[in-house]
Image (tube, rainbow, N blue to C red):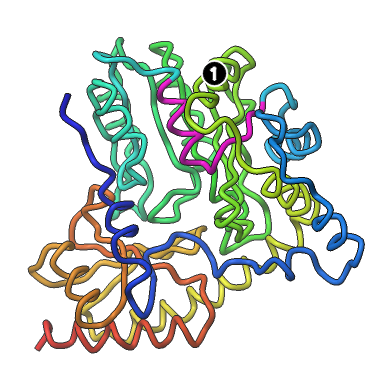
Amino acid sequence: MTFTPFALEEWQSRYEHSVDYNLADSGCHPVALGELLGDDPAAVRQMLETELHYPPVGGTDALRALIADWHGAASDNVLVTVGAAEANAITVSSLVEAGDHVVVMEPGYRQVRGLALNAGAEVDAFPLDPDNGWRPDLAALDSVVRPDTKLIAITNPNNPVGTILTPDELDAVVAAAARVGAWVLADEVYRGTERLTDEITPSLCSRYDKLVCVGSLSKAFGLPGLRLGWLVAPPALVEAAWRRHEYATIATSMLSMHLAEIALESKDRLLTRNRGLIRDGYTRLAQWVAESNGLLSVVPPEATALAFVRYHLPLTSAEVADTLRTQAGVLVGAGHHFGVEHHLRITHGLQPDYLNAALTNITKVLQTYQA
């Protein structure tokens, strides 16, 4: 069978530790362990006393309850995984077989697309429209959904463009799925990264009976190094995914689960911290775009620590991204990694001096193209 590599993750894994500035990651500057634990000696002592045994394979009871509360679900609907990446992978493995039809949102994080192709499925996309503020083209969605569509996959808020789907748009996605009996996979890892409001994006969790919601601590919580994610789904699908979880990873670590409980118990503090980085970072990036003399443009994202920046040059995104890597020492995501050309995904939820220096280096290289 032909194998489709995950181009974005291959790009990052090859180069993210060999550049001066990594703007290709998709979250905020990470939380340090001491920052997570705070000044509470009891919390430090409890962590140091944690026995590094196998944890409960599906997640501790306390952690599953906290995740259920985050999505407005019940604990029986939760399975803890090694990051959202595993949650997406075992969901697709549970639902999609060779010959099935899958619909994905683009531009988008192309993991589900690749997983479906590698399972032997046929994949179509419906677009977010840049000329309409990256809103979903719902007529296009209706046109690609077929009687044999097995799964519709969305990311809300969206990676890479930061769109938050409205209630009406979410209803339209659910209606398209219900019309043919398809499942909906809602990747919700960016809930809590809202740039323009402190209101958390509602979970799609309770809107449909054939629905899987995926989350993690990597984005809104600033804890990608814990490699802890989850899926929320009807109990029968949780069981099917759990059996695949046992093959793939068995469990994430005991220490990750312990720290995840602390993170979710103190979520307001972490969300406030990361929204501050996102809002300050986007202000800096928007000013940088405004000072580019028409070389760059961007549709302001509603959420995420990301901006999907358009460059106005007759070059492919792979060419531009590779030149920035080799000549500016800056790693960014190329637009073709997300299904759209002439764009770069740039992370801005970073420390100010680091972000400013990286953007300055990008400008120097892009100006040589412009000249």
Locate residue 313, reporting x and y percent: 12, 72
Residue bearing mark 1: 243
Q: Against 240, is 193 above or below?
A: below
Locate residue 95, reporting x and y percent: 42, 17
Quadrant, the C terminus: bottom left
Using the image as rendered, state which of residue 259 and residue 112 is in the foreground.
259
Give the total of numbered labels.
1
Locate residue 308, reporting x and y percent: 34, 62
Residues shaded magenta: 78-93
Q: Against 86, is 327 above or below?
A: below
Using the image as rendered, state which of residue 259 and residue 96 is in the foreground.
259
Q: Residue type at mark 1?
A: Arg
Label the magenta part by its dominant secondary structure.
helix
In the image, is residue 87 part of the stretch drawn in magenta? yes
Horizontal side, residue 275 vs residue 157: left or right? right
Q: Against 9, is 283 above or below?
A: below
Identify the residue at image location x=24%, y=86%.
293
Identify the residue at image location x=47%, y=36%.
169
Identify the residue at image location x=59%, y=49%.
191
Q: Quadrant of residue 209?
A: top right
Identify the residue at image location x=79%, y=31%.
61
Q: Against 347, is 231 above or below?
A: above
Locate residue 368, reporting x and y percent: 13, 87
